[in-house]
Amino acid sequence: MFLPAGYPDSVSEDYLSFQCWDTLQAMCSYLRGVLATQSVLQSVGVGDDKATPLAAALQWVLRDGSGMIGGLTFAYLVGPKFDVNVKRWRLFADVAHDVGLTLDMVAPYFPTLVTEVLCLSSVCKAMRSVAGSATRSSLMTHFAKKDNMADCTAKEGSQETTVKLFGLIFGMYFANAVNSLPQAVWIAFLFLTGIHVYANYNAVSCLCIPTVNCSRGLILVQRFLTSDNVPSKENVAGHSEHVSE
């Protein structure tokens, strides 16, 4: 149900380790999303007698519109670079998501700038969506060894749906538990953000992509010049190229 047919022979060796870390970061994202949504609703006036439905609707339209424009612009400017630096852009996508959720969390603290903060948050999330979708396609191609990219993509969707289902159930109890104190909400959010960043870094670190880009080519040349040996793809993948490339 959750693994491609013929596993493990039908996928690359780094498939399982990547998916484990990816599942952990997805759960953290969903739980943080519950807290961030609560802050967004508060910032647009839910529960405030002075707020009007029209004002909230206009803020939502501006927020969504900003995200759409930001996503289109980002895809136009960066689109050709995704395939070359898959690991870096995958990490970028999740960091952009972290920034977007953090902006959602701080929006209620800036009542005069709520619309601007939420629009910027929407742009960050749009960049995350574009970069995440683009790199996911490249990663599924990398994982598929038996011409089974569609199966890998389908199972990726099943894994994601299952994480969301568990997050939906656990998120209700989680939100009730941390909502007792504002400090508890922020502690939980920052703690989950730390786990999210750690999981994403480990997810891209365990990827062993066999193709050579500028960063991996430079590593190969440097290792050869210093040791007269050509390092294996595993050794090159272990280098933090997703940060330096």
Image: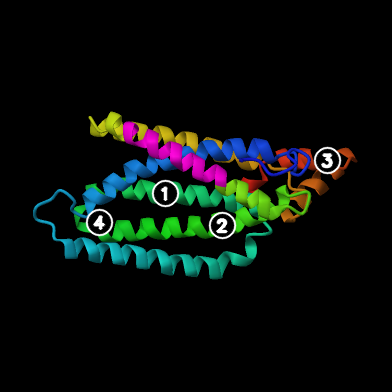
Left or right: where 2 falls relative to 170: right
| Residue 206 makes an appearance in the image | no
Q: Earlier in the sequence, mark 4 or mark 3?
A: 4
Q: Which residue is mark 1?
A: 99
- Quadrant of the rendering where the N terminus is positioned: top right
Q: Give me the C-alpha separation between circle 3 and circle 1.
A: 35 Å
Q: Residue at x 33, y 45 (%)?
A: 36
The percent position of residue 107, horizontal first and vertical second, equals 27, 50
Q: Which residue is mark 2?
A: 133
Q: Residues within 10 Å of mark 1 (few under 14, many from 20)?
A: some
Q: Which residue is mark 4?
A: 114
Compared to residue 209, the image places residue 67 above or below, namely: below
**Which is nearer the eye, 163 or 122?**
163
Q: Residues within 10 Å of mark 2 (few under 14, many from 20)?
A: some
Secondary structure beneath dot 4 equals helix
Tell me, yes or no, whether the two marked residues, 4 and 1, touch with CB atoms within 8 Å: no
- Corner quadrant of residue 78: bottom right
Magenta residues span: 158-174
Q: Which three-letter amino acid code belongs to the residue tagged 4?
A: Val
Q: Which residue is mark 3?
A: 232
